[in-house]
Amino acid sequence: MSELKTKQHDGDVFEFIDSYANSEQKKQDSYKLVEFMQKVTGYPPKICGGIQ
């Protein structure tokens, strides 16, 4: 069986949003999406990324 290429890591979700979103509107939309996803799943946000 092959290994998953996307792994969770301990990066800060909000720090990532702040550094990646290039407008205030995108930041606010991202924060709302994180809030919604956390409410639906019941789990805190995590960052996932591909293997380097």
Image: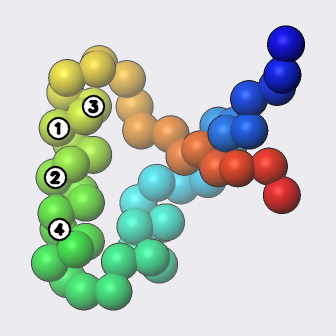
| Callout 1–callout 2 Cβ contact below 8 Å | yes
Instruction: Estimate how packed mark 4 is, as few (under 14), some (14 to 19) or many (20 or more) residues with alpha carbons within 10 Å.
Output: some
Residue 10 in sight in this render: no
Q: Secondary structure at mark 2?
A: helix
Residue pointed to by mark 1: 36
Residue 44 in sight in this render: yes
Q: Amino acid at mark 1?
A: Phe
Q: Amino acid at mark 3?
A: Gln
Q: Is residue 40 above or below residue 51?
A: above
Q: Secondary structure at mark 3?
A: helix
Q: Amino acid at mark 4?
A: Gln
Residue 28 lies, in percent from the top left, at 17, 68
Question: Which of the two residues, 1 or 41, is positioned nearer the viewer here?
Answer: 1
Quarter of the picture containing the N terminus is top right
Q: Is residue 25 above or below residue 2?
A: below
Residue pointed to by mark 2: 32
Q: CA distance from mark 1 to mark 4?
A: 12 Å
Residue pointed to by mark 4: 28
Q: Secondary structure at mark 4?
A: helix
Q: Place residue 42 in its image quadrant.
A: top left
Q: Amino acid at mark 2?
A: Lys
Sequence-earlier tag: 1 or 4: 4
